[in-house]
Image: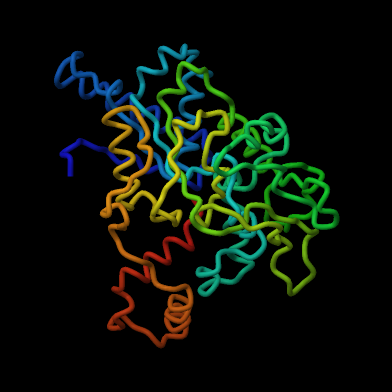
Amino acid sequence: DKGWNYITFAYDWRRTLAESATQLRYFLSEFQRRVIEKFGAQYAPLSETSLCCHSMGGNVAMTFIHQLRGDLGLSAKQVSTWFKYLITIGTPFYGTSTHMARYYKGIDLLDTFYSVNAMRKIVGSLPGPYTLMYLPQRIYARYKNEFAKDKKYPLKQYPMRDGGDSSLAADPYDPHYAPRYPNTVDTAFLGKAEEALEIVSAKLPETLHDKIFNIRSGLEEMDVAQSWLPFPKPGKLSPIKCLEKGPGDGTVPAWSARLCWLDNCRVYNTRYAAEHSSLPDHREVHLAVERVISTGEIPKRVTKRKADHNLFGRPASLKRVDEFFVDVAAGDADETDKRFKDPAIWRRVVMDSCIG
């Protein structure tokens, strides 16, 4: 609408955050080099380029920033020349409430076509999504006070509890709890994921704080704390149980989608946009992003009526999609079935099947 230039960077959520961040660094450096080569150094673009990230993309961008400081040894001032603003949308800095169960029961919609065991093997073979479980306990301990001080959506205790004794924490990255996982979970990936989350969660110098903004939703009721029992007996799919319901976007608890050390004035809590996968398509989020890029400030609240609008409409119900998939798997639906071309059905498929 504004005639702005934009480029989509499609990271591979199956890979590690470090791999994707390295690719982002190469992508941006090549972008800068080619523009300068064609138009001259006076048009170097990165200092005026904002990075707008959805979901796991925000963790990729944070890893990229820490790589600039660690791998390249850049000062905060030098890092600031690589981007104008970093805007994250529904980013699970401290994990999601939906991914851990996939190690036990696969992915519901895809289980229709494959077996639960096959999907568990696939999910367990992907190193990237191991960073999408609730944060390691030592990260929570480091920022405990900051989590509790979140005025809108505080986190008052470590969110994963031991199902045998809810007074005890159960860290999904702690090797002590490894026997609770099915054998399709790679413990080496768990260790590397914990290291990756240490990088994502590390506090940046305050001189970079004014370049970072978080957009999050707390309009859906979802798991904000869970209990974890030992690996279930045959016939039972998952020992992950909801311990407490609270605000979030259906995938990411609201307390997880905000860097706990970032000032409140750099965090936008949505008024209309609610569901995780559709946040970047929502007009309210577009208006908030526009405000940040134009002024360097988060809007107090987007109140225009047109903000209550999603570009792609509402998704179909999960029941309707399940019925469609059962018909396809049974051979009772062919390409003439209108459901194949129903965007509402495929929107729900993306929402419920996407890991990253």
* Residue depicted at x 35% and y 46%: 285
For the residue pair 233 and 91, the one nearer the viewer reads as 91
Q: Residue 277 sits in which quadrant?
A: bottom left
Q: Residue 127 sits in which quadrant?
A: top right
Look at the picture and state if 306 lies above or below 118: above
Horizontally, is 338 left or right of 216 in the view? left
Look at the picture and state if 353 lies above or below 125: below
Q: Position of residue 206 (x, y in %)?
A: 50, 18
Q: Position of residue 5 (x, y in %)?
A: 20, 36
Look at the picture and state if 176 lies above or below 47: below
Q: Report the number of numbered marks.
A: 0
Q: Residue furthest bottom?
A: 332
For the residue pair 151 and 52, the one nearer the viewer reads as 151
Which corner quadrant holds the N terminus?
Answer: top left
For the residue pair 339 and 206, the one nearer the viewer reads as 206
Q: Position of residue 236 (x, y in %)?
A: 73, 71
Q: How is the image coloured?
A: rainbow
Q: Residue 208 sits in which quadrant?
A: top left
Q: Position of residue 18 (x, y in %)?
A: 52, 33
* Residue depicted at x 40% and y 27%: 25
* Residue depicted at x 47% and y 73%: 318
Horizontally, is 17 left or right of 231 in the view? left
